[in-house]
Image: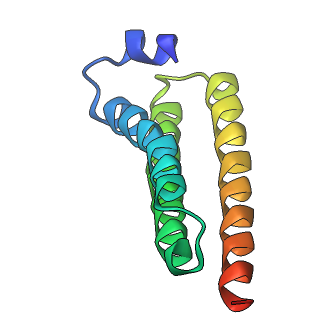
Amino acid sequence: STRLRERAASDEEAVQAREAAREVPARIAGGHCIGYEPGALCGNIACCRRAIASLERSLDGLLALRRRGTLTAAEADQMLRGGRELGEAIAERIEELRQRVRSR
């Protein structure tokens, strides 16, 4: 968020959270570009798993910012909730892709 950037532009944990968050859609898009053909599904799954790993790094950074008071509890909790929901959606997508692999 803009507030996060303003408060912690040079803060390592803020940078970690921001950069990792930016990786999430890029990883998902990468999986989409790999495709949905039977031979590409495992690559797509790998990209989704990398998206979850990036998301977890972002959430870890947000938690650190919350502990230090850089973000208020309300601000952090809102972002953390959204991040967890996103992680659940990606995990569901991975399971859907795995079902396609199994049904080949």
Which residue extends farthest front? 37
For residue 104, above or below residue 90:
below
For residue 78, above or below residue 34:
above
In this view, the residue in front, 56 or 46, is 46
User: Does residue 40 appear anywhere in the picture?
Assistant: yes
Where residue 96 appears, x then y in whole percent? 74, 71
- Colouring style: rainbow
For residue 37, what is the image quadrant?
bottom right
Q: How many marks?
A: 0
Where is the C terminus found, in terms of image quarters?
bottom right
User: Does residue 61 appear anywhere in the picture?
Assistant: no
Q: Is residue 45 left or right of residue 65?
A: right
Where residue 69 appears, x then y in whole percent? 50, 25
Q: Is residue 45 left or right of residue 104?
A: left
Q: Is residue 7 left or right of residue 48?
A: left
For residue 103, what is the image quadrant?
bottom right
What's the residue at 50%, 11% (across, down)? 3
What's the residue at 74%, 47% (across, down)? 85
What's the residue at 44%, 43% (across, down)? 26
In this view, the residue in front, 25 or 59, is 25
For residue 83, above or below residue 66:
below
In this view, the residue in front, 76 or 25, is 25
Where residue 14 appears, x then y in whole percent? 37, 30
Where residue 72 appears, x then y in whole percent? 60, 22
For residue 15, above or below residue 64:
above
